[in-house]
Image (tube, rainbow, N blue to C red):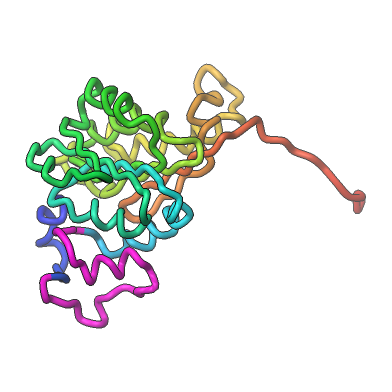
């Protein structure tokens, strides 16, 4: 996991298995995901603490609605348990990982698919195997090619009222992942261009920028520290009106 790679850069605080965080280190625990994590009764989970508020802000509306949640990056399988606990009965979780040992986490409500998220043919198989995706969480290999390929292949497959979340965007600054500050080809630079595409309606040069499929299927992009959340939603050509009486 990425957390191990950069554990030397920041203080590492553990919870679970009888260990507890100092009071000052605990985030505000009105968040059910944070509550689960810091009292983790299950398998290992590694998460940056500030992620939980972001998850809850965007995922809360799916609770008790039996969503299909696809998580790329299974590792020890602890987050699979966390998602089931958070979203409630009827949730279908699909875990994707390159490590075949992750098959052991499969059960009646959890499907495990083994393959490389950087392989477009494998991702086509994922689309065939998982007919509906309400939430997609990319917490996989974190390389630039993997993040970009996964977005291009799976974002269109997410439901029109769904959520696409890519985390650990700080790898866009790490050379070992193909990153570098403002380096061309990083996922962060790629996603900045999505802001332009969101505004494709207003382009005066449609050979360069136009209202494409992304424009017409995306409601909002939310950039946070190390996370991009993309809210899908059908968009038609924006309308503009004037009402009221002129003042001068």
Vertical order, 63 against 197 (above or below): below
Vertical order, 190 against 224 (above or below): above
Q: Residue at x 72, y 35 (%)?
A: 239
Q: Please give left or right for residue 245 compared with residue 161 in the image.
A: right
Vertical order, 50 against 145 (above or below): below
* Residue 116, horizontal then vertical, whole percent: 17, 30
Q: Main secondary structure of the magenta part?
A: loop
Q: Residue at x 25, y 82 (%)?
A: 23
| Residue reaching furthest to the bottom | 23
* Residue 196, horizontal then vertical, whole percent: 49, 34
| Residue reaching furthest to the left | 101
Q: Please give left or right for residue 117 compared with residue 5 in the image.
A: right
Looking at the rendering, which quadrant does residue 122 occupy?
A: top left
Residue closest to the eye, 162 or 54: 162
Q: Is residue 239 magenta?
A: no
Q: Please give left or right for residue 17 compared with residue 158 in the image.
A: left
Magenta extent: 17-46
Note whether residue 138 is visible: no
């Amino acid at each position: 996991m990425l957390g191990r790679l950069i554990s030397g850069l920041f203080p590492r605080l553990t919870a679970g298995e009888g260990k507890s965080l100092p009071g000052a280190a605990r985030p505000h625990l009105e968040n059910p995901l944070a509550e689960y994590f810091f009292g983790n009764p299950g398998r290992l989970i590694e998460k940056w603490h500030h992620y939980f508020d972001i998850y809850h802000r965007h995922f809360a509306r799916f609770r008790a609605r039996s969503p299909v949640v696809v998580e790329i990056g299974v590792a020890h399988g602890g987050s699979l348990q966390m998602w089931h606990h958070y979203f409630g009965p009827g949730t279908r979780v699909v875990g994707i990982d390159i490590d075949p040992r992750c098959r052991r986490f499969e059960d009646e409500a959890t499907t495990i698919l083994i393959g490389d998220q950087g392989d477009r043919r494998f991702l086509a198989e994922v689309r065939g195997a998982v007919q509906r995706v309400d939430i997609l969480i990319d917490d996989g290999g974190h390389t630039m090619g993997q993040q970009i390929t996964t977005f291009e292949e799976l974002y269109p497959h997410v439901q029109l009222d769904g959520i696409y979340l890519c985390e650990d965007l700080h790898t866009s600054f790490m050379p070992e992942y193909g990153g570098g500050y403002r380096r061309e080809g990083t996922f962060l630079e790629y996603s900045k261009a999505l802001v332009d595409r969101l505004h494709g309606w207003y382009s005066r040069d449609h050979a360069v920028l136009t209202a494409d499929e992304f424009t017409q299927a995306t409601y909002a992009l939310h950039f946070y520290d190390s996370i991009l959340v993309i809210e899908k939603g059908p968009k038609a050509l924006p309308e503009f009106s004037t009402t009221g009486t002129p003042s001068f």
